[in-house]
């Protein structure tokens, strides 16, 4: 009896050892990739697929915005590294390498348990140009269940990626007589402060970051309530207590541009509303030294407290933010 148990145990050890050796052999050679391709080939013959094309140009030969969103999304997938050919580019940050799908290469994705694939097809146009098309392949049995949610998912993820990549800028308003080039001039926002560097109670800092994250996800909730999708903060204290640093930390955390309003360069309430209409929907609008402005007796402007309050929470803002 003991010899039988020993033999079974040795047999089990031998099987496990053989399995480990085979696995190591496959992963150390090209056989694992050949096996994967063979499995994909078998899967292609078993299922029925439907194809959807996303051309680079629309019917008017203008840029197809959805093509750019899909391409951004595909280049963010980890599975792009499994393509036979992948382009490598230097990123904006030092030591940052960006992977980009090469021509006529395929990348696979998974959504809600369904497997899909995209191919970056390059075709012949006229003699001097070529046509670029991203082709989605999806199983017909999965199309009705995941197609629309999947495309919405691509929209959302690509927008988030673009938001993280974009350069944050600082906008400053000019006098009302400079309408030819717009009322705002901008420079890159290079303030060094972030939530990692500002001096603040750790619990309060985490609450602020959590509040901002909740705000980013609550746009539809605000709309259902009929409220303007915005968040207001009142910062007060003597100079040098970190008010500007806090604004910079929020701007970097949200990747939002900063519009710094100088009320002394605004002529009246209508001019203030025009400034608001020229800001972007996802931005931080800062009104500094509001108490000093309202207490100033001699001003070269007729902006009123009521105008400032309407600027912050009026119908004009609703028209812009929606």
Image: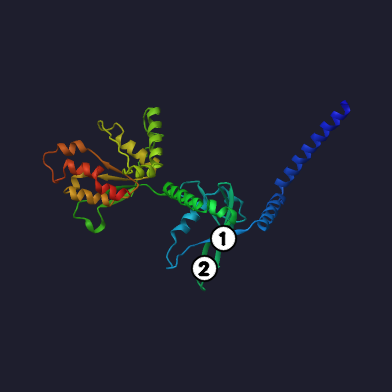
In the visual, does 44 lie left or right of 181? Answer: right
Q: Are marks 2 and 1 in contact (CB under 8 Å)?
A: no
CA–CA distance between discs 2 and 1?
Answer: 21 Å
Q: Residue at x 79, y 38 (%)?
A: 15
**Any part of residue 200 in sight:** yes
Residue 91 point in image, percent of width and height: 48, 50
First reached walking from the N terminus: tag 2 or tag 1: 1
Tag 1, which secondary structure?
A: strand
Mark 2 surroundings: few (<14), some (14-19) or many (≥20) residues within 10 A:
few
Residue placed under numbered mark 1 in the picture: 51
Residue placed under numbered mark 2 in the picture: 130
How many discs appear? 2
Furthest-top residue in this view? 2
Q: Nearer the viewer, residue 66 or 47?
A: 47
Residue 94 point in image, percent of width and height: 48, 46
Residue 96 point in image, percent of width and height: 50, 47
């Amino acid at each position: 009896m003991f010899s039988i148990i020993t033999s079974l145990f040795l047999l089990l050890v031998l099987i496990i050892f053989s399995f480990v050796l085979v696995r190591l052999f496959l992963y150390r050679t090209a056989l694992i990739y050949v096996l994967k391709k063979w499995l994909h080939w078998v899967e292609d013959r078993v299922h029925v697929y439907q194809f959807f094309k996303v051309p680079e140009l629309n019917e008017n030969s203008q840029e197809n915005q959805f093509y750019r969103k899909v391409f951004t999304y595909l280049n963010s997938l980890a599975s792009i590294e499994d393509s036979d050919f992948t382009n490598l580019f230097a990123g904006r940050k030092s030591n940052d390498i960006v992977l980009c799908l090469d021509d006529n290469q395929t990348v696979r994705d998974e959504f809600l348990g369904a497997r899909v694939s995209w191919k970056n097809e390059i075709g012949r146009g006229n003699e001097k140009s070529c046509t670029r098309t991203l082709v989605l392949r999806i199983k017909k049995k999965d199309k009705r269940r995941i197609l629309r949610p999947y495309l919405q998912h691509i929209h959302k993820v690509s927008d988030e990626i673009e938001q993280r990549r974009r350069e944050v800028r600082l906008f400053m308003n000019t006098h009302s007589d400079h309408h030819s080039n717009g009322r705002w001039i901008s420079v890159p926002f290079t303030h060094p402060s972030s939530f990692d560097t500002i001096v603040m109670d750790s619990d309060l800092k985490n609450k602020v970051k959590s509040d901002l994250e909740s705000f980013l996800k609550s746009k539809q909730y605000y709309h259902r309530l009929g409220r303007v999708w915005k968040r207001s903060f009142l910062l007060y204290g003597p100079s040098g207590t970190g008010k500007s640093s806090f604004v910079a930390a929020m701007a970097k955390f949200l990747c939002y541009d900063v519009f710094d309003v100088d009320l002394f360069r605004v002529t009246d309430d209508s001019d203030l509303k025009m400034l608001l209409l020229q800001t972007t929907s996802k931005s931080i609008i800062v009104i500094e030294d509001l108490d000093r402005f309202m207490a100033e007796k001699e001003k070269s402007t007729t902006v009123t407290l009521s105008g400032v309050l309407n600027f912050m929470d009026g119908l004009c803002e609703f028209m812009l933010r929606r």
